[in-house]
Amino acid sequence: MERHKKPKKNVLVVCTTCRDRRELQTDTFQQHYNIHFQNYDDSILDRILCKCLTNMPQAFVPADDLNHLLDFCKKNAIDGLFSTDDYPGSIYASILAHRLGLPGPTPQSVLTCQHKYYSRIAQKHIVPEATPDFQLIDPQKFSQSTFNLPFPAFIKPVKSYFSIMAEKILDKTQLEKNITQLLPPDLFLQQLNWFLRNYSDFDLSGNYLIAENLLTGWQVTLEGFVYNKQVIIMGIIDSIMYPGTYSFERFVYPSQLPQSAQQSMMEIAKRFILGIDLDNTFFNIEFMYNPEDGTQHIIEVNPRICSQFADLYEKVDGYNSYQALVELALGQRPEIKHRQGKFNIAASFVLRRFNNKLAAKVPTEQDFFTFHHTFPEGRFEMHLQKGQYLDAIMQDGKSYRYGLIHLGASDEQELFAKFEASKKLLPFEFTD
């Protein structure tokens, strides 16, 4: 007698990214799940910040968008949903899960992470030893006499987005000069402010800045997930900057941070995540470790997966974090693996320039094929097209990120050799 196959679960990916499609449109996932992708233009917020867009499309009105997604979930019997998109995706997903009674974090806990001032307030209460001094700033009513942090200080919008508009401020003169230029456009903050009014008990909008003590040292990202109030750590990744900048050069897994520091970060992460009642979701926490005094401080907390790291785990641990993400969305406890992959080390290399240029040449489809044939484990993302200026793509205000190359290797020497070979296989040329 033929055995009956279990019906596939229906999973919705909210605010779908190109990376979501790449990782989830594989035989592994398609054989076990019916995965639905929301059609979503993930370039809209980038274009707002680049001042290439001055009116929000009608489809991005939160109330209308949520109603449309709720109808879709009901019509397609969605069993679980998630978003890897930070903003607005992670907030949308939490609201939808809350409204439909599906596994997922509460909107309040997600917004606690999204609004960096309220996140700092929670950190100071729950993990004070890992919280730098900070101060809220209203850029429209700012007075130097009320600023009480030492210089240099770090200032950013309370709604951060890929380090955009985050600045190291050296003195009062620079502070006065930059204070009104660091706030994102109102159009960028419209959705956040709607979410805050309707799904949180917070009084402050997103139209503020936060100043903090400047943190220095060894930066890492700790990533994990919560399943029914059990915190599981996926791993810790080293975040390495271009020298003398705050622009990322590469992310390397596993971290070379001392084990004692890693263990301390894990304990801090568990206390904080449980303390804000974040549950049934991925999270990642950026930490700064100071090797001189051994302290660890939280840079920021994000209530979502780091999709950029998904295949790094796969290379080293033999387990793609998207698998855990899908299982978590369906109310299942993920059983992750460690150190069962084909490689000892993996990295996400960031292709970046520090001056605005025109892309005169970009890799072709044949170049992509050759790269993947040479390095089957490799991933490549290209963020601009031929004939496009770098300032037309998302930037951090100081540099231009135009691509990512992901590779695995047996050791660091082989990793860098593969990276140099990959750059030759994926040629870019820039001109004035």
Image (tube, rainbow, N blue to C red):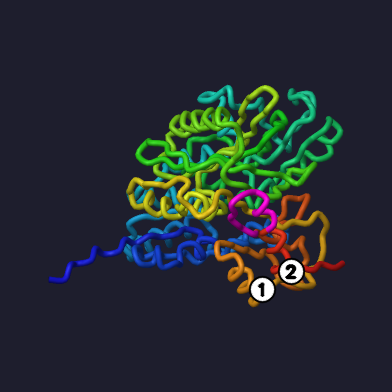
Q: Nearer the viewer, residue 376 or 387?
A: 376
Residue drawn at x 71%, y 50% as measured from the top left: 249
Amino acid type, residue under disc 1 in the picture? Asp
Q: Position of residue 105 (x, y in %)?
A: 42, 43
Q: Which mark is residue 367?
A: 1
Within 10 angstroms of label 2, few (less than 14), some, or many (20 or more) residues? Answer: few
Q: Which mark is residue 427?
A: 2
Of the two numbered discs 2 and 1 on the same chain, state the one appearing first in sequence.
1
Q: Position of residue 229 (x, y in %)?
A: 37, 36
Q: Nearer the viewer, residue 11 or 270?
A: 270
| Residue 199 percent coordinates (x, y) | 46, 43
Relative side of 369 to 332, left or right: right
Q: Quadrant of the N terminus?
A: bottom left
Residue interval drawn in magenta: 405-417
Could you tell me if residue 285 is visible in this image?
A: yes
Question: Which residue reaches farthest left?
Answer: 1
Q: Which mark is residue 15?
A: none
Q: Quadrant of residue 278?
A: top left
Q: Residue at x 56, y 33 (%)?
A: 118
For residue 301, above or below residue 145 = below
